[in-house]
Image (cartoon, rainbow, N blue to C red):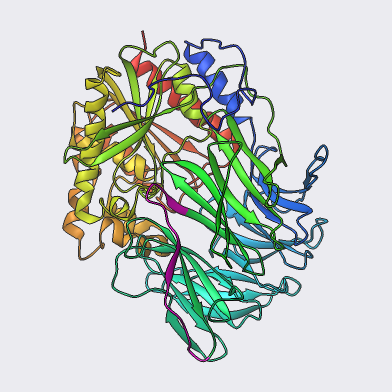
Amino acid sequence: MTADIGTAVPSAGEQADGPGAGVRVPTSTVKDAVALAEGLVDAWGSWGPNMTPDARQVAFISDRSGSPQLWIQDVVLDGAQPPARHVPLSEDPVISVRWAADSRWLACEVATDGGVRTAVWVVRPDGSDARRVAGGTDEHAELGPWTRSGHRFVVTVPGTVPGAPTRAYLADPSTGRLDPLAEGDLVHVLDISLEERFIVLRDGERGQEYVSVVDRLMDEDFSALPHGATGSTEVALIRPAPDDHAGPVYVYLASDVGLPRRQLIGLPFGPNGWRGEPRTLAAREDAELECIDADDAGRLLLLVWNVAGRSELELLDTATGGRTAISGLPGLVAADPVLSRDGSGVVLGVQGPTRPRELWHLDTTTHAWTRVTSAPPLPRRRLVVPTLETFQGRDGLPLSGWLYRAPGRLNGAGPVVVYLHGGPEDQERPAFAPQHQALAAAGLSVFALNIRGSSGFGREFVHADDLHGRYDAFADVLAAAEHLVEAGIAEPGRLAVTGRSYGGYLTLACLAFSPGVFAAGVDICGMSDLVTFYRDSEPWIAAAAVTKYGHPERDRALLEDISPLASAGSIDVPLLVVHGEHDTNVPIGEAHQIVAALRALDRPVEYLELPGEGHVFRRASSRKELAAATTRFLYDRLRPG
């Protein structure tokens, strides 16, 4: 089934006068397409906001200097926004920031050397006293929440060898002292109560995360939800209970444990081991709860719903249970929402196919939207707004993808690039995608898939590719190729496949296990052999992956069977392999070994290694090089007529 296939005009949630609007200028050559990609990469964004308690200033991450760095800006609701101020911290990319409750410190997570291992830094808002607290080249450290007083914050350090525990600490920003807080297999501290008595912990492998509440005074803990049900809880926070509810404290969870979709669950509890029964506070049949935040008093909750990739916001009054839908979101996709401590406002990231990531403020009383940051003008090209295309897998499972129709090819078949996201629990959404736009400008339509295993479509869907379900995921990609041809969108023989991370692995799997379907492929930081992936990846990454791919010992036969490297001889079409120099998530050896195997067979393979990058390519120069190489490679192989 097709929903409004191929459009080049803004859709609902996209403003016609936003970035990229104007006279449509055809870009039919690869040179123009590469120039467009570079211009779109240069359209820096802003994301990951965190506010002062009075909500008058926001700290955030922006790549306006070419690499993600820390910035601060005043929030003005009745006039022009002042310019943002750069806070120097490190030459390495900054990937997250949290502002202390007392406003005196900022804590940041930094990608060491641009790679996978991160370090935690602190800095004063004026840029002074910047220093590293934990992590670095030889140790990975992750940033957690601040205490409600603002005096300390959480640092989590996974074990560096297989089987070693993960340890969480409370860090003092002034002295750098680390006091032990919690220990477990894959623990993350999600929140801490006001008086620091209770902490909310997440643990478990991917897709099977569970939340526990720890009473530090009594040295006791309990599971927030019943054991035994399938599903996962990744987001939770703790607040004072509403005045007319049982229990002095409430834990709010976004969970799909035993449920068809992720919902808002509330759990009252108190000291001396007392706790009530968890109950559903908000649910939707058409959407999954993606993000939650709350004011300090626990009176107002912010809910962000994922509706087939688009975002919708609600405010929930915890005393009455009343829910208020928020209209006018200035983009299709929202991320990183932060509700002010007094509940008066929200700052969140907003983006869409025709607008880079910007920060916007929502007044929770008037529901008025105010732009906090802006992006530079985009190239004068009419960007493609994708449309949602639905089809069925070979076993009848409903599947979907976002179709970027090449301008001038709104009717009739042409070359198509099938794009596969990572994860596999990620989700393709109508966001700002320079690579998709560049390929469409070169005359290559893009079909960005959400096959089984993708998030956003319910618990059964996200687990449908676990372990032996991987074969069905392979079949989903082939079903998409068949659909594109049967629907008259793609010409037979003019289909290519590409993807990053797990999507890169899927690209290699489709070329190796189903030759003859695709005419070319681009593998971006994908696994080529799951056995060597487990052997060489970071221990905490490997330990969490067993629920998705299989155990490296118990499921060895399965891992060998679904690893493309052993079937490299079946890859007989041109392949471009791209990898980051410092990638230790999917180690760079995964790229080296598939390239070596294909070269030994005298197969057409090209290799691009991006220096100073890890698993995520954060620098603008690297993203430009990747976009140019991918666009030229696929254009030359598919040759749109």
> Is residue 612 visible from the viewing direction of this image?
no
Q: Residue at x 17, y 49 (%)?
A: 561
Q: Is residue 370 above or below residue 302?
A: above
User: Quick one: quadrant of the N terminus?
Assistant: top left
Question: Picture quarter containing residue 173?
Answer: bottom right
Q: Can residue 53 be seen in this snapshot?
A: yes
Q: Residue at x 19, y 35 (%)?
A: 569
Q: Horizontal placement of 350 versus 284: left or right?
A: right
**Which residue occupies 56% across, 10% down?**
25
* Residue nearest the observer in this picture, 544 or 261: 261
The stretch in magenta equals: 272-289
Say left or right for 154 vs 89: left
Q: Position of residue 611 (x, y in %)?
A: 53, 40
* Residue 355 among magenta residues: no
Residue 466 picture quarter: bottom left
**In the image, residue 180 lies at what x, y percent?**
58, 81
Q: Residue at x 69, y 73 (%)?
A: 152
Identify which residue, 34 or 565, lies in the foreground: 34
Left or right of residue 372, residue 227 in this image: left
Q: Quadrant of the C terminus?
A: top left
